[in-house]
Amino acid sequence: PAVALGRSKKRRRTLPFNELSDAVAREMYSQVLCPEKGEPVTSLVERGDNITVTQAIELLRLMHSFAPSLNLEVSNWVSSKLDRKLRYQLEDPFSVISGTLPRWAVTLPKVCPFLFSLKTRKMLMKYTAFGPSFAVHWTQEHKVGSFLKRRATVQTELNAQTDPRKMQKLSQELSNIEEHVVRSNYWLGTLQSTLVRLEKGEEFLRQADVAMGFLANASKLMEVQFEGETGFGVAVTQSFYVEVAQALQDRSVNSSIPMWVEDDDSGTGQQHLLCRKGLLLKPLPPGPQRDQVVHRFRFLGRLMGQALREGFIVPLPLADEFFALLLDEPLGPSNLPKPGHGVAGELLGALNEFLEDLALN
């Protein structure tokens, strides 16, 4: 069966920013690229004639590259003043939504991310990485999100209430919340959402792939509803990401399209891969099967992007080496599976350690 895509039954006012294309969003929010390895900071920092600033940043990056040998905590690198200054800058909704943040606010966190707390960097990413529509969405969530959640809770309680006195009390509270939200200086409206209807079963991953392809260039929220079920909303959408993560770890699915290295429990009859170290990419020679795997990883990337910009979690236990490859960090023999990792190929890691011991002796 085909994937059913349609507008949600909820009435939502589309933001005017929603009409902006992804190309415009990328132009507004991605003018500063992450520095390549070995690239001087001079070309990335708007410094004018202040060479001292550039040299100080270069020195900080150099010192941080030796951080493991210095045994310093991550928190020791965070500059409380810079962190507070960036958060203050992000409090200006006009600068965030119009894409006119100061150059340092988008450059310095990319050149020296260790100077800022994780919370602030996540805030910056939500406000600048997904286009104007989601910049508005996350700005509103930050300012009035607690009221919106309370409104949903009160509405649920009101629908289930039969006592007239309690119904009147809840109705008054609901009215007060809506009045507060509407009068807020940060409230512009909600994003339009697309309702995706999927069927659990053998066609689930294919349907999810089609849905992600459809939504890849759309600045809309996604709401999921499963065939045969009436519920939809945040909880159902989160369960969709859980279902996809479980399906991608299914042994039969991985056997047909081998994304991951097999675990050492293949003969135990477990339905899903159980790798204690996490899921490792399986190297494949060129061919039709590799092309299928590449397509599946494209789907995974779109899925991760959709979840990231909407604030959902994809519970896929990926190994550290997976993220090292994404960051273009070098991998060597020390990254081979070792005994106890629960992954096929542990013998290679054991032999590598044996060779290293022989070289030392």
Image (cartoon, rainbow, N blue to C red):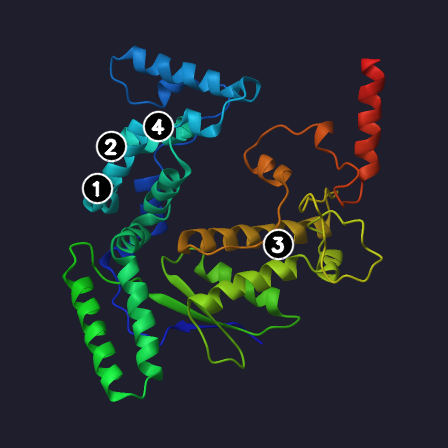
317 or 84: nearer the eye?
84
Whether 226 is drawn above or below 331: the answer is below
* Residue that carries the numbered disc 4 in the rendered image: 108
> Residue 70: x, y in percent?
53, 17
- Between the C-alphas of marks 3 and 2, the distance is 38 Å
- Please give the residue where the numbered disc 1 appears in the rendered image: 95
Kindly identify the amino acid type of the residue bearing the numbered disc 4: Leu
Q: Quadrant for residue 161, please give it.
A: bottom left
State whether residue 150 appears in this view. Answer: yes
In 3D space, how far apart are the residues under numbered discs 3 and 4 (Cα atoms)? 34 Å
> Label 3: which residue?
296
Residue in the image at 60% along x and 68% along y = 204
Q: Nearer the viewer, residue 265 or 55?
A: 265
* Cβ atoms at labels 3 and 2 below 8 Å apart: no
| Tag 1 near tag 2, CB within 8 Å | yes
Identify residue for label 2. Answer: 102
Q: Quadrant of residue 127?
A: top left
Quadrant assignment, res 122: top left
* Helix, strand or loop at mark 4: helix
Horizontal side, residue 214 vs residue 299: left or right: left
Horizontal side, residue 348 vs residue 26: left or right? right
